[in-house]
Amino acid sequence: MKPRDWAALGARLIVGATLVYAGTAKLAVAPEEFANVIVSYGLVGPDLALPLAGLLPWVEVAVGWALAAGFLGRAAAGAAAAMYAMFLFALGHALAFGIPLPNCGCFGDSVHLSPAHAMLFDSLSAALCALVWRLGSGALSLDGWAERGA
Amino acid sequence: MKTRFSRRLFGAALVALLTAACAFLARREKKPFSVSAPDFRTRGPVGAPVLIVEFSDFQCPACRAAEPVLQRLFPVYQDKIRFVFKDFPLPMHHWARAGALAAECAGRQGKFWPYHDILYDRQDAWTNDKAATFLAGYARELKLDEPEWNACLADPTTASAVDADARDAQNAWVRATPTFFVNGRRFVGARELAELAPLFIDQELKK
């Protein structure tokens, strides 16, 4: 294994674990609660926020596990990057329009990050996604295992 | 080729299984809505099957309007409800924080609920430049120990208690008062409390 494979593994595990934790924390609260957080960002109304609140945590957990396990690594990294881009847009919109958010709401009831800290965190996570996209799934991945079966 | 496909299929199944396991564990381990409040701001037995937490503001007319609704719920459900009052004085209400501090200090002398009732009943009277005079008058009316009450108002721990409640409100994404959490389910305003909360309470009691 080359160093780049281990770098890809590290990036996958960090982003994957973060997404699994964030999604699970949101799944632990009622979707109405997360919908309330989404509405606070001022981008979507309650009608759209509730289905989004029901769906997004599942996507986060599934993409997180796919990254951690190295399953369709590049596609999972792309999906995670798209989610982080969406989070960054929402946070940027809230900061630009002075919408007062007590915290980012990224981790349900558990960890409370300020919107500015959340933007930094999401930017770093998006950069790690780009690294996985560039390097592929790397070491200890289901992708590698499947390829060896070809 | 066949092996690769079956390994991909195994990968997909593994990811789906782990995702479902996370959802199952998250919902199974669902934390009860946790609140901290001094005993004098609570009513009903500890361990009652239904916990109602109110985030309220003494200057807010909607909070005053919710009071009769709450008062109707208590006799209906009696010892099946535990109620916790938490302060969330909104910045736009200039006198709300003074009211919250005054009620907190009345509570430390065992008179939180009578003081709370006076603040809502006479909301129109004290919410002005003379708030301090009115609030002191209510303390006298309830025969509170005035020097102790005044010392309590100046005590930084009193302000800290109100600030802690406000932080709890923000962390729970409370954006309007009154907001009620009934076993963790959010109800905003008197109307939702009157029309939707009893149905939810009945459901919770059937569990």
Image (cartoon, rainbow, N blue to C red):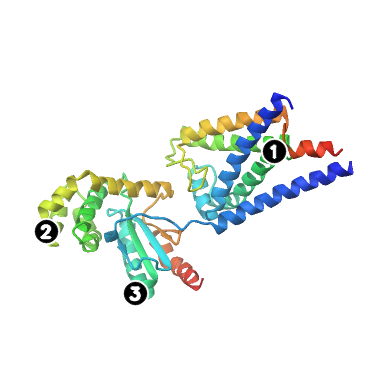
Tell me if residue A16 comes above or below residue B58 in the rendering.
above
Q: Residues within 10 Å of mark 2 (few under 14, many from 20)?
A: few
Q: Amino acid at mark 2?
A: Arg
| The N terminus of chain A - image quarter | top right
The answer to whether tags 1 and 2 share a subunit is no
Determine if residue A49 is in view: no
Label ID, residue A97: none
Name which of mark 3 and mark 2 comes first in the sequence. Answer: 3
| Residue B128 point in image, percent of width and height | 20, 49
Label ID, residue A76: 1
Residue that appears at 30% across and 49% down: B89
Q: CA distance from mark 1 to mark 2?
A: 67 Å
In this rendering, would A61 be left or right of A46?
Answer: right
Q: CA distance from mark 3 to mark 1?
A: 55 Å
Residue marked by disc 2: B140
| Residue B152 point in image, percent of width and height | 18, 49
Q: Nearer the viewer, mark 1 or mark 2?
A: 1
User: Which secondary structure, mark 2?
Assistant: helix
- Between residues A73 and B96, which one lies in front from this camera angle? A73
Q: Residues within 10 Å of mark 3 (few under 14, many from 20)?
A: few
Mark 1 chain: A
Q: Amino acid at mark 1?
A: Ala
Residue marked by disc 3: B75
Q: Amino acid at mark 3?
A: Pro
- Between residues A50 and B82, which one lies in front from this camera angle? B82
**Figure quadrant of residue B70:** bottom left
Residue that appears at 78% across and 47% down: B10
Determine if residue B76 is in view: yes
